[in-house]
Amino acid sequence: MDLRFTDDELAFRDEVRAFFRSALPDSIRRKMIDGHHPSKEDLVTWSRILNAKGWAVPHWPVEWGGTGWSPVKQYIFREELQKTPAPEPLAFGVNMVGPVIYTFGNDEQKRRFLPRIANLDDWWCQGFSEPGAGSDLASLKMTAKRDGDYYIVNGQKTWTTLAQHADWIFCLVRTDSSVKKQEGISFLLVDMKTPGVTVRPIQTIDGDHEVNEVFFDDVHVPVENLVGKENKGWDYAKFLLSNERVGIARIGISKARLQRVRELASLERIGDVPLIETPRFREKLTAVEIDLKALEMTQLRVVAAESRREKGKPDPASSILKIKGSEIQQATTELLMEVVGPFALPYQPEEDGRNEPFDGPDWASTAAPTYFNWRKVSIYGGSNEIQKNIIAKAILGF
């Protein structure tokens, strides 16, 4: 298998790089380089720039705004976006519910939701995890009982990322409790403004407000918001999670962070020697770079096989990408912490209300919050332990 890019693919990469250099607002670029979270306004601005170019949803069908790019060009686009670094389009809409709707939804749902997802007119969040039903997602308890033209929804979702901004939430709900637990689940779209929906913030270990609890008390959801068939939601969820796990590899992000580590380690000194030249640090950095190159080769093999895979069928190899990709992302944050050294100790969340200056170089202030926040990447999207079970069953046949 030849994993080298063709001349046409290399020319495409140059085109993408040039566009990102010219189109990404400098204020957003600086924020991303410094490790700060893009705001909601930043994401909306950048998503609409991409949509105006026709690049907001490159992997979607052409009739709904897709580009018709090959899997390789889609990979190049995603990697260059992450390396720039530029904000990625809101994954909950673009990579998760959007593909579920255009694959399993009806024509009215496609016309209603897909253009608004592409332009980020609607902000989506994901209602999957519940207390007691995280990695064991099939154990969810939130119910949706049919009552005429509505489902009456009751229950709770948790760890709901960016629900404080959301206009809509896509939920897995239990519509039949008399069958095997995976067979009684449906996929429902819920307007967050519906009476009975309550969002409560959860403060994460880095001091940020990124995730939430969402409560549903007798929420009336129109039956027309059911995606696909009732009690088939588990199949749609597996399709969605497979897409999510491929994205979690985030090779471009790890490449950008390693480049940043190299730059900063050249500035920091251990005695008279730059940190980048010390044997112990170079050994650690090289080990992560080797792992990342191996992951990149694996990702390219998955991309090369994508055109031969049955449409809509999850690729179990995405679990491999999820495991190793998340481990490498965490390793890059550890390297950055080592570069920062003692200046990581007085770490300050971005919005902690302090009026005292940070004690250290400006670039050091986000190292600890990022390190703590990224402990999550080996858990969400299905914990790495669960991914190993998937690999054992679906790939190794155990």
Image (cartoon, helix red, strand yellow):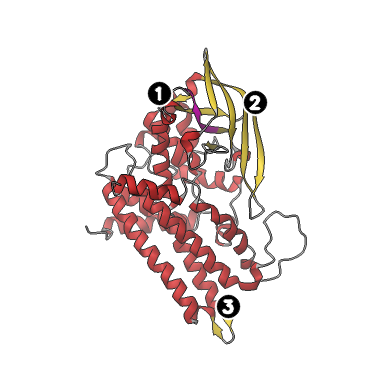
- Please provide the residue range marked out in magenta: 169-176
Q: Position of residue 116 (x, y in %)?
A: 50, 33
Vertical arrangement, residue 75 with respect to residue 283, above or below: above
Q: Position of residue 148 (x, y in %)?
A: 52, 12
Q: Residue furthest top?
A: 148
Q: How many angstroms separate mark 3 from mark 1 (CA)?
A: 58 Å
Q: Who comes first in sequence, dot 2 or dot 1? A: 2
Examine the structure image and report whether residue 395 is included in the region drawn in magenta: no
Q: Nearer the viewer, residue 99 or 283?
A: 283
The numbered disc on residue 18 is none
> In this figure, which residue is indicated by the disc labeled 2?
196
User: Label 2 neighbourhood size at 10 Å, few (<14), some (14-19), many (20+)?
Assistant: some
Q: Nearer the viewer, residue 182 or 49?
A: 182
Q: As shown in the figure, which amino acid type bears the numbered disc 3?
A: Glu
Residue at 47 percent across and 81 percent down: it is 279
Is disc 2 in contact with disc 1, using a CB cutoff of under 8 Å?
A: no
Give the side of residue 307 with respect to residue 254, left or right: left
Q: How many angstroms separate mark 2 from mark 3 (CA)?
A: 53 Å
Residue at 46 percent across and 72 percent down: it is 285
> In this figure, which residue is indicated by the disc labeled 3?
268
SS at mark 2 in the image:
loop
Give the side of residue 102 with respect to residue 309, left or right: right
> In this figure, which residue is indicated by the disc labeled 1?
229
Q: Who comes first in sequence, dot 3 or dot 1? A: 1
Tell me if residue 18 can be seen.
no
SS at mark 1 in the image:
loop
Q: As shown in the figure, which amino acid type bears the numbered disc 1?
A: Lys
